[in-house]
Image: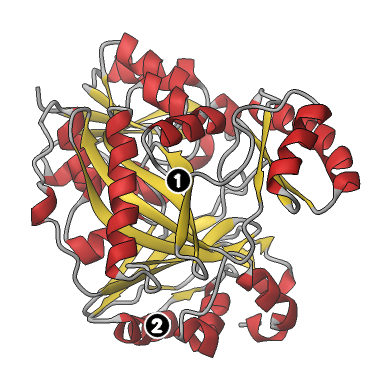
Amino acid sequence: MAIRSLLIANRGEIAVRIIRAARELGIHTVQVHSSADADSLAVQLADDAIEIGPPQAAKSYLNIAALIEAAKSSGVDAVHPGYGFLAENAEFAAAVEAAGMRFVGPTAETIHLMGDKVAARTAAAEAGVPTVPGSAGRIEGMEEAKAVIEETGFPVLIKAAAGGGGRGIRIAHDMAELEHLVPQASAEAQAAFGDGGLYIERAIQDARHVEVQILGDGQRVVHCYERECSLQRRRQKVWEEAPAVELDLSHREALCRAAVALAEAVHYRGAGTLEFLYEEATGGFYFIEMNTRIQVEHPVTECITGIDLIGEMLRIAGGEPLRLRQEDIRQEGHAIEVRINAEDPANGFMPFPGVVGELRVPGGPGVRFDSLLYPGYAIPPFYDSLLGKLIVWGENRDHALARLKGALAELKVDGVKTTAPLFTALAEDPEVAAARFHTRWLERWLESNASRLAP
């Protein structure tokens, strides 16, 4: 049965994006909101809205009982979790289905399996997908950790089994650091995720971060090619593009085949992303994790393929079989996305909420701005600092970079400081222009280019 009404269990720019996709499919939208988000753009655009709690996320957007009650009282057919908050929470997915509604995403079982990083590594290995050398499962104490080191050598990453989004990670360069960091990482993982389990893997130095977008209906899976996500600060992506320029055809095909094989092995339903580290020196790639949700950076894939990923998620959740065939999915041109956050890059990226004054949105061919902004909007200080995503498409990467520079020059958000100056500087950098970067490159660049970040 097609979805007729949809509850959006999220906020900000992704809620606006979901509302627009649902509207095109004739789906009635119900936007939940905290008391702090009563005047948000998503609330204004949705057909209906319902308040679910106070500003604190734990009492609103992370409150499963409140969300289920809102969905029931609204009489919706389905719930879309967006990204962040409860998007990868198996308990929430199960609660939605138990209440008689569709969860727009994979099953609770798939979320649980792929959300446990150790279980996901095991599933990848069973599907024949390369994984980073490391522990076969969770480590139980220092003796097991030391046994892994004998195989991998240093440096190693100590990771939370239930972690994600770059959180809960430590790097040890020698045995003394390992003995110090293992209990520290376990305690942090327990506090952050309610699970102190750890695993260890070899630290691949100066690798590229490449991810593959997939769509599945539980039976069949297709890929929508890959994205380059190596420009990161504190393991958080800030600049993404598609396709990944360093991949030749043979490596691209191998990477995408691996992603499809793993997604099919876990009977994946909906949109998902498989993340890999790629070593340019050897041409080797290694699976690191799967995000069982739509990604922040999904627009660059939409730009090069012409596929509305949110729309496809809604069709699949409504019971339609996957309507895309692999041979029909083509990529054209090059797309770049930069994340415009309410942060001051010249002052250590300090959060900078405020009231939006004049707002000038870039336009023209190949320019897209997905945001939560409007003039007079008071940005609440309680949530992630992401204000919007500036996305450009060009016939090739040079064309896309030129459009990005022009769009950044047009963008104006008075009243708050944003990360736009960072991207203006990066777009002019010769190393970025030549795509000579890796996952640690931006951190090093920031150490010597702080003066270039003042607006």
Give the x, y percent position of residue 311: 19, 44
The residue sitting at 40% across, 31% down in the picture is 126
Q: Where on the picture, by quarter, is residue 261?
A: top left
Nearer to the camera, 224 or 175: 175
Q: Amino acid at mark 2?
A: Glu
Dividing the picture into quarters, in which one does residue 314 lie? top left
**Relative to residue 258, is residue 5 drawn left or right?**
left
Residue annotated with mark 1: 130
The numbered dot on residue 410 is 2
380 and 64: which is toward the camera: 64
Q: In the picture provided, is 156 more to the left or to the right than 110? A: right
How busy is the neighbourhood of tag 1: few (under 14 within 10 Å), some, or many (20 plus)? some
Q: Nearer the viewer, mark 1 or mark 2?
A: 1
Q: Quadrant of the C terminus?
A: bottom right
Q: Say whether residue 190 is left or right of residue 135.
A: right
The residue depicted at 41 percent of the width and 85 percent of the height is 405
Quarter of the image containing the N terminus?
top left
Q: Left of 58 or right of it: where is 94?
A: left
Q: What residue do we see at 40% from left, 42% from top?
A: 129
Q: CA distance from mark 1 to mark 2?
A: 43 Å
**Of the residues shown, which amino acid type is indicated by label 1?**
Pro
Within 10 Å of the Cα at label 2, are there few (<14), some (14-19), or many (20+) other Cα atoms?
few
> Can residue 42 be seen by looking at this rendering?
no
Looking at the picture, how far across and down is residue 219, in whole percent?
Answer: 18, 28
Residues at marks 1 and 2 touching, judged by CB atoms closer than 8 Å: no
Q: Is any atom of residue 122 visible in this view? A: yes
Residue for point 25% across, 25% down: 78
Q: Position of residue 90 (x, y in %)?
A: 44, 22
Dot placed on the residue nearer the N-terminal end, 1 or 2:
1
Front one among 41 and 255: 255
